Image (cartoon, rainbow, N blue to C red):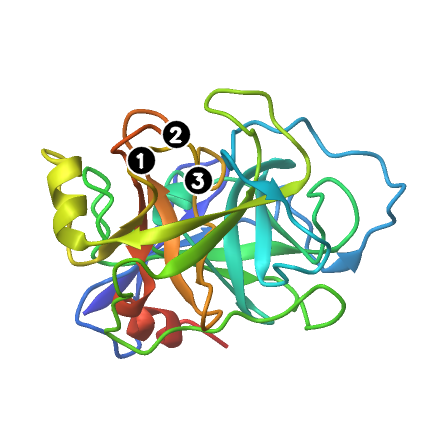
Amino acid sequence: MMKFIFVASAIPALVAALPAPASSGEAEIIWDKDAKLDAPTGSSHRNENAPPREEYMEAGIVGGYTANPGEFPTTISLLNGGSHSCGGALIDPYTVLTAAHCVEMGGSFTVVAGTNQWRFGGEESGVTQAIIHGGYDPSTLDNDFAILKLSTPIFEGPNIAYAILPPAGSDPAPDTPATVAGWGATRNNGPATEDLMAVQVPVVHPDTCADVLFPQPFTQNMICAGYPEGGRDSCQGDSGGPLYDDFTGEVIGVVSFGLNGCAAPQSPGVYARVGRAIGFIQNWSG
């Protein structure tokens, strides 16, 4: 098995192959970011009064609440070209877990951790590689996982912690209370907010997920969460962010997709099932 490395730059991509670490038998695609891109090359603490970043481009949590400082210390903002584009979970000093669809087109990525306002404060690091799960299917968003490797480490500290992962192969039980956090709008297609928002959503039985999502495929690599009546959900811009088990604190899902807009009745949000990707995550951690 070989790994294919695509070098992102102003010239056509250069393709090379490297031996792969042991994994599930699937090849992962690695995007190497060219040093000329404008993502920062190091990690730094930013002054709260620093000039604001570019305007937010996406939407976010619907029907939730404003998170307290430090309430979700593993949640990060993934910036592309200086604007928030997706969420993620900090796994270790050099590793972030996010969604494959957030990075599959490449970009100029920066990770911001340790702040509830993505434009101010916290620690930031450039992204040197984005590694997409080998089983990722962009047509169905199956195995919607990616690992980001940071240019310089982000260490644990005030409002920063590393995510707890579930056991390999684990599947959260139906009705498990879970919480998703992210940045953005408070209603479908609404204006953005700069503050980290959160909402509790129960895990839905997989048979129910398959029924309500049909004909969209629902695979064993997915879980869904939400309320039959709608009203509370993750949304655009929350993609890649972690879904936390409220009992264990484990990251059990990665925000992937939804149908019929955000928080619609009988339309639970769909998350990549982290328990199915532990081997992939561990192979690329550290």
Q: Quadrant of residue 221?
A: bottom left
Residue 156 location, x and y as percent? 68, 73
> What type is the residue that disc 2 sits on?
Cys
Q: Which residue is mark 1?
A: 258
Q: Tally the marks.
A: 3
* Residue pictured at 18% horizontal, 45% vertical: 209
How far apart marks 1 and 2 lie (CA) works out to 7 Å
Badge 3 marks a residue whose secondary structure is loop
User: In this rendering, is residue 252 above or below 122?
Assistant: below
Q: Could you tell me residue 224's position as x and y percent?
A: 28, 49
* Residue at 26% from the left image edge and 65% from the top image edge: 173
* Residue occupied by mark 3: 234
Residue at the extreme front of the image, as rendered: 229
- Is 139 left, or right, of 64 in this rendering? left
Residue 262 tag number = 2
In three-dimensional space, the C-alpha distance between marks 2 and 3, rounded to whole angstroms, equals 7 Å
